[in-house]
Amino acid sequence: MERLLMSQDPVDDVLVPDLIVPSRTVGYTKGHETREMILRSALGILIEEGWQAMSMRRIAASCGIKFGNLTYHYRTREELVRELLEAVISAYEREFETTVYQSGLTPEQRLERYCSLVLEDIQSKKTTRLFPELWALSNHDQFVHDRMHELYARARAPINDIVALMRPDLQQKDCDDLSLFISFSMEGSTVFAGYAKPFLSSMPQIKRISIKSFINIVNTYVPEI
């Protein structure tokens, strides 16, 4: 097992792109660059100032465009947030596809790569500030609550695939539970060892412990009868 943690092709320091702005197939399809500018401005405000500061007028001012021009692309803040989160998760999905789903890797190596990518990303300013902000908001805003759970379900999908490969004897519910456990175990480290957090310097050790533990848990898990 130790060999898996000392791979020849580490995933350390992988930077997930901030956004992959989706193309529109219906409605207003032009202005891709303008929409990307709007979404990047909204993301920057969320990271630096928080949700309360991210009004439509504040975004328009940050972009240097008229409010009417902004609402031409995004009629409401909810519509803008939906596309912003889609752009964020699309960036992760592309990185998972590139890093995790390479041919020739064992399932254990795939899990190692996935967890390395996530734990490295947690240390970025974007991730440390953006996701806790949105999760806190989801306690009071049903729209954000639903979008965040959709986003994380998509983010967990690669873990579920890997667990199923590692343990084809398990039922789907068992794979779901193991994937959820791995996901929230990693995400929970954000408030302790994320960007500018007290235990950031311990993240290399945390990452080694986590990956070894997750591989062992999946390989040895015995469902309750």
Image: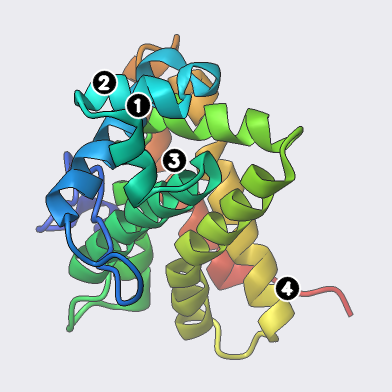
Position in image of residue 46 (x %, y %): 42, 25
Vertical side of 46 occupied by 146: above or below: below
Q: Earlier in the sequence, mark 1 or mark 4?
A: 1
| Corner quadrant of residue 94 | bottom left
Classify the position of the N terminus by image quarter.
Answer: bottom left
| Residue located beneath label 4 in the image | 222
| Residue located beneath label 1 in the image | 59
Residue 17 in sight here? no
Position in image of residue 116 (x %, y %): 31, 48
Label 3 or label 2, whichever lies nearer to me, is 2
Q: Earlier in the sequence, mark 1 or mark 3?
A: 1
| Residue with the most extreme right position | 225
Q: How far is the residue under mark 1 from the one under mark 4?
A: 50 Å
Q: At x 63% / y 64%, what residue is drawn?
A: 178
| Residue located beneath label 3 in the image | 209
Vertical side of 201 occupied by 204: above or below: below
Name the amino acid, label 1: Ile
Q: How far is the residue under mark 1 from the one under mark 2?
A: 5 Å
Asked if marks 1 and 2 touch (Cβ < 8 Å), the reply is yes
The crowd level at tag 2 (other Cα within 10 Å; few <14, some 14-19, many 20+) is some
Name the amino acid, label 2: Ser
